[in-house]
Image (spheres, rainbow, N blue to C red):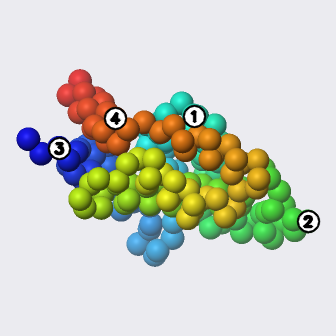
Amino acid sequence: ADPRPPPLEEDMSYVLQPIIDSLSSVTSAEGVIQTEAFLTTCRLILPVLDKLGVAFSPAKSDVSGNIERLAKKVAQHPALFDIALEEVTAGAGAHTAGTSCCNGLLWLKRFLEFTMMLLTELSVEPHTKTLKEAANKSYEACLRPFHGFIASSVFSIVLQFPPTRETFVGGRALGARRAMAG
């Protein structure tokens, strides 16, 4: 028997396919990012953070909070850009406040990049990279440059205890297959 774990794309297809399918509706025919479709896709990515273990719960909570902060603006702003434009044109630094939609969108973008890089790192042949290695590389590239001392210290500890690659990849696919069958 081959000791290598199965390729990521085979095990993860049941989880990743809904995300991939949702991407086509994110951008309008005119090239405008649609707020509701974008947030729907972001919500489909939240289970990836779940599978990184309980230590990632605060990160998932932050990401979810950023999604919901933007969701409150969907009715007024079907185009994502218009949410940011409203805050920037409001003046007085509204767009730079910690609770601003601009700040939430920026951190959401960073976590999406982290997730994309993590999944990409795990999909690289010959599928021997551990989740810990992939998560650390992704964190260093996508999030660490923007974290202060405390946040980077917390993430350093969290990244020491990820689940195994097999648990992360196999458990997600198994759960998705059960959901689709039931």
Residue type at numbered disc 3: Pro
Residue type at numbered disc 4: Thr
SS for tag 2?
A: loop
Percent coordinates x, y for residue 45 in the rendering: 45, 46
Q: In the image, 12: left or right of 89?
A: left
Please tell me which residue lies in front, 2 or 121. Answer: 2
Disc number lying in front (3 or 2) = 3
Q: Earlier in the sequence, mark 2 or mark 4?
A: 2
Query: Residue 81 falls in which quadrant of the image?
Result: bottom right
Q: Earlier in the sequence, mark 4 or mark 1?
A: 1
Please tell me which residue lies in front, 22 or 36. Answer: 22
Percent coordinates x, y for residue 37 in the rendering: 47, 54
Disc number lying in front (2 or 4) = 4
CA separation in Å, label 4 and label 1:
15 Å
Residue type at numbered disc 1: Ala
CA separation in Å, label 2 and label 4:
48 Å
Residue drawn at 63 percent across, 37 percent down:
58
Q: For mark 1, what is the residue?
A: 55
Callout 4–callout 1 Cβ contact below 8 Å: no
SS for tag 4?
A: helix
Q: For mark 2, what is the residue?
A: 92
Q: For mark 3, what is the residue?
A: 3
Q: Earlier in the sequence, mark 1 or mark 3?
A: 3
SS for tag 1?
A: helix
